[in-house]
Image: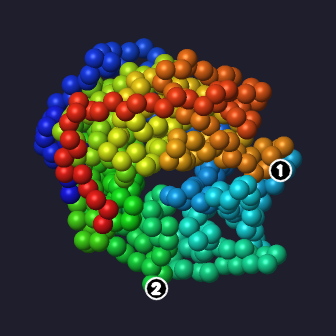
Amino acid sequence: MTACAIEGKTAGATATVEPLPEDSGEPGEPGEPEAAVTGDDASGDGLPGAAAPGEPPVSARLRVPAPFTITADGSYAARLTAAPGAPGAERAWYPERWTLDGPEPYAVPLPLDQPEEPDSDVVPLADGRVLIRRLVADRHTFSLLYPTGPGTGELPLGAVECTGLTLLPPSPDGGSVFALVAGERSTAIWLVAGGAFGPEHVAEIPGHCSGGVWLDRTGRLLALDRQLPGGGPVKAVAVDLERGGEVTPLLQIAPESEDRLLLADADSGLLLIRSDAPGHDRLGWGVLGSSLPVRFPECLRPADVAVTPFAVQPGQMLMPESCAVALRIDGAAGSWVGVWRPAGRRLHQLAVPEGWQAGSGFWSRDGVLHLPYANAATPCAVALMEAPADGDECRRGDPFDQAGSGAEPSATPALPMVCKPVPLGQAPLLGRMTPG
């Protein structure tokens, strides 16, 4: 497979980062956050991992279930939730499925006879069923939940016996769910839903793997962040699940740099990357198969906040620089949304509705960002936010000021102008992958 080329070389070759003029700031300037929030740290409540004065560390407190997981096509979402209770009282957690592709979003509770543990995971499938992972002793059990009349149906799938297991993002095929099981010197990939006879061992990858980003629309090519058994820097690699887990280098910005892939868009080839190649952890972007270098825009490292991309606008064939990217911004005031385009070179910071499932959302092809939220007044809703044009003045209201963050959280009275794509130096995107 063709990987992201850096300075005219294919992945796997050593390269030097040469930031463009807009990236002229020195790494490590005061005010830059030390690290972005990863999906494993995201709690959806203010700054992930932060503890208020006098409180025990997060690891010593009850784990709060992660926010929404959304199918690759944006049709369904799922989460663990619980009815409000008195402060300090034990909460009864249960799965909830949201339908997002109809004229109006609605939620369907999927409780069983016993409440779920808050460390269970749920993943929606494109047919409306919800996979749930439960930890029972040293076994991770899997079942499919679905509404049936007034109750909830459950189809047990089997179990994987291991000490640690991480579910990957929903597969683009809509019917499969994969998981990583890290061992001492290798990482196993399991198909835990969508197989013929329960959980199936798919591949064994040397080294410790984390992350997980799909590179195509079929669920065949998976990007993982890998550290080799002997140690060394973390590098993103591509894994071909239809060829026994064949591994191909994907990111190699500098020999000793830590290069992780955060997001990828299969239509345009846009890659969102986190790397310390510039001398400090930075958000950057590149294009799969391009001969141009990875770039690290200054606007993606605002002071005193952590910035994490979570959605890329699809459908921008051969125009990665015109894709709108949604980013979760975490600061002292809470969490809000940023919108950025590679061609625009600016980060728009926008207010969000109360109860936004922080770090969750998806784009339509015409540049409308869908943000799921739930609060006391609205138990199930999706806010639609038009992507600001880069020529507009940057607007960000108070993230908690709902006057401008209800149904129209962007507070932009008019539709933004269409941004004319700026080709990446007129360079062809060489060696682009095709699905399958």
Tag 1: amino acid: Pro
Q: Are marks 1 and 2 in contact (CB under 8 Å)?
A: no
Please tell me the numbered disc located at residue 197.
2
User: Residue 251, percent across and down?
Assistant: 24, 44
Q: Residue at x 15, y 45 (%)?
A: 10
Farthest residue toward the right? 86
Q: Helix, strand, or loop for circle 1?
A: loop
Give the Cα separation between the discs numbered 1 and 2: 39 Å
The residue at the point 74 percent across, 58 percent down is: 106
Q: Is residue 115 above or below residue 430?
A: below
Mark positioned earlier in the residue sequence (1 or 2): 1
Seen from the viewer's position, the closer of residues 29 and 159 is 29
* Residue on which the image places disc 1: 84
Q: Nearer the viewer, residue 397 or 213?
A: 397
Q: Could you tell me the amino acid type at mark 2?
A: Phe
In this view of the protein, which residue sits in the foreground, 147 or 434?
A: 434
Q: Nearer the viewer, residue 331 or 221?
A: 221
Quadrant for the C terminus, please: bottom left
The scheme the figure's colours follow is: rainbow
Image quarter of residue 252:
top left
Residue 429 occupies which quadrant of the picture? top left
Left/right of residue 126 with respect to residue 373 in the rendered view: left
Q: Is residue 354 left or right of residue 217?
A: right
Where in the figure is residue 267, as x and y percent of width and height?
37, 51
Q: From what the image shows, is residue 47 above or below residue 243?
A: above
Q: Give the quadrant of the N terminus.
A: bottom left
For the question of whether residue 14 can be seen, the reply is yes
Residue 352 sits above or below residue 95 on the image: above
* Residue 62 percent location from the top left of the image: 66, 49
